[in-house]
Structures are given as C-alpha cells and as structure tokens.
Amino acid sequence: MEGFIDIHSHILPGLDDGAGDMEETREMLRIAYREGIRDIITTPHFFASRQNASPEAINEVLCRVQKSMEEWKVPIRLYTGNEIFYRSEIADLLEEGKIHTLAGSQYVLVEFDPTVEYTYLRDGIIKLASYDYLPIVAHAERYECLFREKRRLRRLKEHGALLQVNGSTLSGSFMSEASKRGRYMVKQGLIDFLGTDAHSSRTRSPRIQKSASYLYKKLGKEKAEKILFENPRAVIHNELIE
C-alpha cells in the first residue's frame, strides 16, 4: 500500500522534540517513503506558555528540507502545520497568523493534557469551531476523560471535533491501555484520521503499514480508505469531511 497522507509528524529538524538534525529528518523521510507515505503535514509543537518556532521559522526550515530532498531523491510532499497545545488564547493566535493551521486549511491539530477535564476539552473544541476552525483532536486515545464515560467521544464529535489516533497505538501491545482505547474507537467507528506522530527514526518512527492493515482487516476497504486517504486529502484541499 502507498499514497498515505500523514497529518501528524515532528519531522522538521531542530524545532521541537522531534528530529534533532537534518540527518535524522532524512532517515525519517526514507522510512516514511518505504512505508508508503507520500504526503506529510509537518506539525511542530506549539505551546502558548513557551517560546516556539514562528510560522516564518517553520516555513524556512521546511524549505531547506525540501531542497535537500531533491538531492536525497525522496519524492514526498511536505506541508506546514502545528500541533497546538490548547489554551483559551489559541483561537486568537490562529486569527493573528501566529500558528499554522494544517496545510493552510481551516483544519487545526490540537492536543490537551492527558488528564484534562472533559468540560475543558469540550469547551476548547466549541471555541475553535466558533471561529470557523475544524479541530482535529491529536492522539485522542490518550485522554482519560473521554473513556471514563465513552459516550463523550460521540458528544465531542457532535460539537465539531474530528479524532486522530496514532498508528503505533493500533500496531502496539494489545495489553496497553492506549491500544485498548484505540481499538475500541476502531470498533465503534469513531476514528477520522490515523497519524504517525513520528518523532525520530527509532522509537517513534513514521510507520503506518501495520496499523493501516489493521484498519483494512477490521473496517473493510471503504471505511479504512476514508480514514487513510479521503479524510487527509480533504484537509490538504481544505474541503469538508462528510
């Protein structure tokens, strides 16, 4: 399988806790290509309470990587983005152009503390949606509040949230809590996106084949391809997901 679009990746060098240098980025890109990934939205972390790479700095690093990719002969398309740690001022910062949306679209990748209270998470989604953003909750399997009362997952989607699960969650140990949650979401038809959340070429590498195969097995071709191809393509083209 190939043609995957990865909407969650820390592959740009020196911007956060992902790739530390260009050599690491090159190896991550080679792994991604072998895994069948052909488009990557780069999503360095953004924390309102810390110093972050500016949109201009992200653009500059992405351009340097793209130029190097011509020499490396790795035909993957890269797009700008951020993984945004939610705070109440985030919507205003997005409006001011101080944070990247995903591939310049109305979609935003937003994360929360794993122990966040449901009301705070819900209200954050509602606020972003009120600004006409389309919030994608990063690694939704991590949030305890969504699984203490599992009906909250559907309620959150009713408020406008889309849910992304990490590929490693579905391909990892069946005994881990995250894997149990991720597989529950697959069974209930709650996943909108699969992302690698890649941080390195080693322990958190950009691998997707194993988890993609799991989706095909459990959901069938049509539903799996909506998660793996159609929904990510809609983000890149800034189209609504039906």
Image: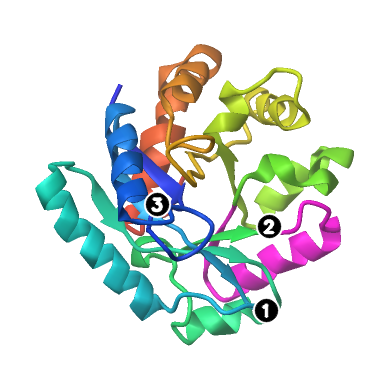
Residue 125 location, quadrant: bottom right
Give the mark nearer the N terminus: 3 vs 2. 3
- Evaluate whether residue 149 shows in this view: no
| Residue numbers of the magenta segment | 112-137
Task: Count neighbours of disc 1 (C-alpha within 10 A) and say few if under 14, some if 14 to 19, many if 20 or more.
Answer: few
Q: Image check: 31 left or right of 131?
A: left
Q: CA distance from mark 3 to mark 1?
A: 22 Å
Q: CA distance from mark 3 to mark 2?
A: 31 Å
What amino acid type is highlighted by mark number 2?
His
Disc 3 designates what residue?
11
Is residue 108 in the magenta section?
no
Disc 1 designates what residue?
49
Of the residues tagged 1 and 2, which is closer to the observer? 1
Give the mark nearer the N terminus: 1 vs 2. 1
Against 34, residue 124 (above or below) is below
Across and down, in percent, residue 109 comes to 53, 58
What amino acid type is highlighted by mark number 3?
Ile
What amino acid type is highlighted by mark number 1?
Ser
The structure residue drawn at horizontal position 67% and vertical position 72%, both measured from the top left corner, is 127
Across and down, in percent, residue 73 comes to 12, 42
Task: Count neighbours of disc 2 (C-alpha within 10 A) and say few if under 14, some if 14 to 19, many if 20 or more.
Answer: some
Query: As drawn, which residue projects farthest toward the right?
Result: 148
Name the one closer to the observer, 175 or 222. Answer: 175
Name the one closer to the observer, 188 or 201. Answer: 201
The structure residue drawn at horizontal position 43% and vertical position 48%, both measured from the top left corner, is 7
Mark sitting on residue 159 = 2
Is residue 113 in the magenta section?
yes
The structure residue drawn at horizontal position 15% and vertical position 59%, both measured from the top left corner, is 67
Query: As drawn, which residue projects farthest toward the bottom?
Result: 96
Residue 35 location, quadrant: top left
Of the residues tagged 3 and 2, which is closer to the observer? 3
Across and down, in percent, residue 83 comes to 53, 61
